[in-house]
Amino acid sequence: MLKRRSLLAAAAATLLFSAVAQADYKDEYTVSTVLPSAFPWGQAADKWVELVKERSDGRINMKIYSNSQLVSGDQTKEFSAMRSGLIDMSVGSTINWSPQVPELNLFSLPFLMPDYAAIDAITQGEAGEAVFAAIKKRGVTPLAWGENGFRELSNSKLTIDEPADLDGLKIRVVGSPLFQDTFTALGANPTQMSWADAKPALTTGAVDGQENPLSVFDVARIDQVGQKYLTRWHYMADPLVFAVSNSIWDQFSAEDQALLKQAAIDAGQWEIEKSRSEIDATLAAIKERGVEVTELTDEQRDAFMKATQSVYETWTPRIGEDLVKQAQEAVANRNQ
């Protein structure tokens, strides 16, 4: 009888603790993204929110704020806002978070990942675990990987299939010093500007070209602002990260932490498979609109890789030599 009472008391205490913990949950959690639902990035966030609501029976509600509106459009401030608790959750970009997490510059190293198998070898291996540990250490809990895709190069001037073709071209790049160094090494004139400023600049010819995933080129109709030449050079890929602010993460019960994480993993895998399966159709649509698409041979890609080796010399110490080596080994062994 005493044992039974003890068990009942323990069960009651567990239920009470769970009820108290859930009573502290927010009515709604903010989820920040850069791109909305028209893009795979936004669809990844949509799927996460959907799965969490379904699996929690509506106990955990998440609301998406796209276009970086929680940080007044400045996507590079998203990670800092999460770390300070101003944003609860995010499906974020490794590029945008790299100013606060130097290890994330790994994915921006030029020509490190030639194919999807290379991306997966890094994210799903020791290098990916090390990157997640670096994010966690800086105040944000990473849960799963998504995908923004390979960033390809477009311009309004000429076909680009060798480094010399970039000589003097004004290329709009995102706000990362590594991107500046990459395009400078290739002889281009990199120009940092927001996307809001980029489209008018492309229209007027203030800049000659830009680099973005095919999904962005397609949905944003970049071909309508003079970008008639597209080179698929796979020079870098931008994995997405499903994450929660550490201060928010610690408020969830262990069961709900597991729920949030598994939902993120499932949403990420769903989005990755969907994004990759749509590439051929997206490419066909771009070609139908009159864009000349150049596919680099292995030899041509090697020429670009050799031209950007100085970027590795500069950035490997900042990213971490062990991490870069882990990633390079994972890529080299990806098909074994």
Image: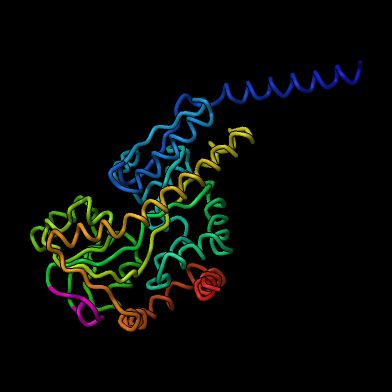
Q: How is the image coloured?
A: rainbow
Q: From this viewpoint, is residue 226 visible? A: yes
- Image position, residue 282 (x, y; %): 26, 56
Q: Which residues are magenta?
A: 158-167
Magenta stretch secondary structure, dominant:
loop
For this view, does 179 lie left or right of residue 262?
A: left
Q: Residue 66: which quarter of the image?
A: top left
232 relative to 302, above or below:
above
Q: Residue 278: which quarter of the image?
A: bottom left
* Viewport quadrant of the N terminus: top right
**Near-viewer residue (46 or 112):** 46
Residue 217 falls inside the magenta stretch: no
Q: From this viewpoint, is residue 321 visible? A: no
- Image position, residue 207 (x, y; %): 15, 64
For this view, does 186 lie left or right of residue 335?
A: left
**Near-viewer residue (14 or 99):** 14
219 relative to 14, above or below:
below
Q: Residue 239: which quarter of the image?
A: bottom left
- Image position, residue 303 (x, y; %): 32, 83
- Image point 31% across, 79% down: which residue? 297
- Image position, residue 196 (x, y; %): 20, 50
Residue 164 falls inside the magenta stretch: yes
**Near-viewer residue (256 or 187):** 256
286 relative to 30, above or below:
below
- Image point 22% across, 74% down: which residue? 188
